[in-house]
Each structure stands twice: as structure tokens, then as C-alpha cells.
Amino acid sequence: MANDATERAVMLFEQGYSCSQSVFAAFAPDGGLTADTALRIAGGLGGGMGRLGEVCGAVTGAILAIGLAHGATRPDDDAAKEATYTLVNELAGRFRRRNGSVLCRELLGMSIDSADLLQRARDEGVFGSTCPGLVRAAAEIVVELLADA
């Protein structure tokens, strides 16, 4: 399922934003945030959280989008917290089923946590061949989850 947010996410990635920035910024206007604010918030999450290869930035951007749409705003709002966690767990499960993992280094097939490894990934075109599909998948799943929630 694709919609405007999905296409915005892919377009942002193609413009050079990170996977996390692209997904989160695509949903930000619907949640009352400017794109600039969303880009800043998600800025450190690319490459599996600062290129550590941990949870894929497309997934963390999607988690931020879910939180923006459904997150608790009061510490005693246990229902909102549980609903958000349920959506995040569903996101992770769907993304994992579609792509085999939620970890950046596994999705890329390599680590990018050093300058040499990052350059190797760039030279091999890993980001251009792998990440657009991951951005699309994460955004599509958010669209589905938010439509059902």
C-alpha cells in the first residue's frame, strides 16, 4: 500500500536525507511538525543509530512517526503507552517478515561503523540498492498501521 507519505519518504531519501529522516519527515506534517523539525529529530538515527548498524533508520523513523501519531503525553496514560508499544511491535514484526531483519548491518549485509567500512558500502552502492526499498517498506507499514489504529 502506497500513499503520499510513502512517496514523500522515498523522495526525501533520494534527495540525500537518511533513512530515518526520510520516513519520519514524511509523516511529520500530519502530526503537526514541520519537516525541518522532523529532520533534526531523526538526524542521529541513520545507519542504525549513528552508523552503529543497530535498528535500521527506516524502522526508527517509523517508530517516531507512530509515537507522533499515538504516543502518550501524560505519564499516567497507560492506554496510549500500551497502544503505541503494540503498534511498534507490529511494525517491527511486519518489517522483519518483509526484509528478514530490523538490524541495519544485517539488512545491508555489512557493517558501516568505521570510515573504511562506510566507504566500502558507498563504493559498492549498497545504500542506493538496498535502502530505498527499506524506506518504502517502513513507510508503507506505518500507513497501514495508522489506517488500522
Image: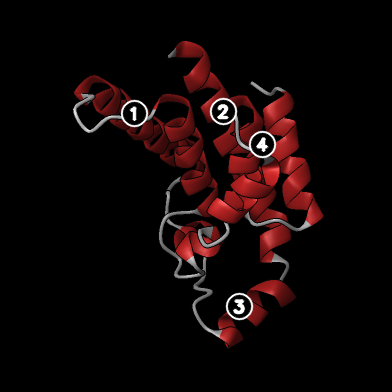
Q: Mark 4: which amino acid?
A: Ala
* Rendering coords of residue 133 (x, y %): 65, 44
Residue at mark 1: 84
Which residue: 58% across, 41% down? 24
Which residue: 45% across, 70% down? 52
Q: Mark 3: which amino acid?
A: Leu
> Is 47 placed above or below 133 here?
below
Q: Is residue 12 left or right of residue 80?
A: right
Viewer-nearest of discs 1 and 2:
2
Nearer to the camera, 149 or 92: 149
Disc with the residue nearer the chain's start (2 vs 4)? 4
Viewer-nearest of discs 3 and 2:
2
Viewer-nearest of discs 1 and 3:
1
Residue at mark 3: 118
Q: CA distance from mark 4 to mark 3?
A: 26 Å
Which residue: 68% across, 29% down? 5
Which residue: 57% across, 23% down? 143
Q: Quadrant of the N terminus?
A: top right
Mark 3 surroundings: few (<14), some (14-19) or many (≥20) residues within 10 A? some
* Rendering coords of residue 93 (x, y %): 37, 34
Disc with the residue nearer the chain's start (3 vs 2)? 2
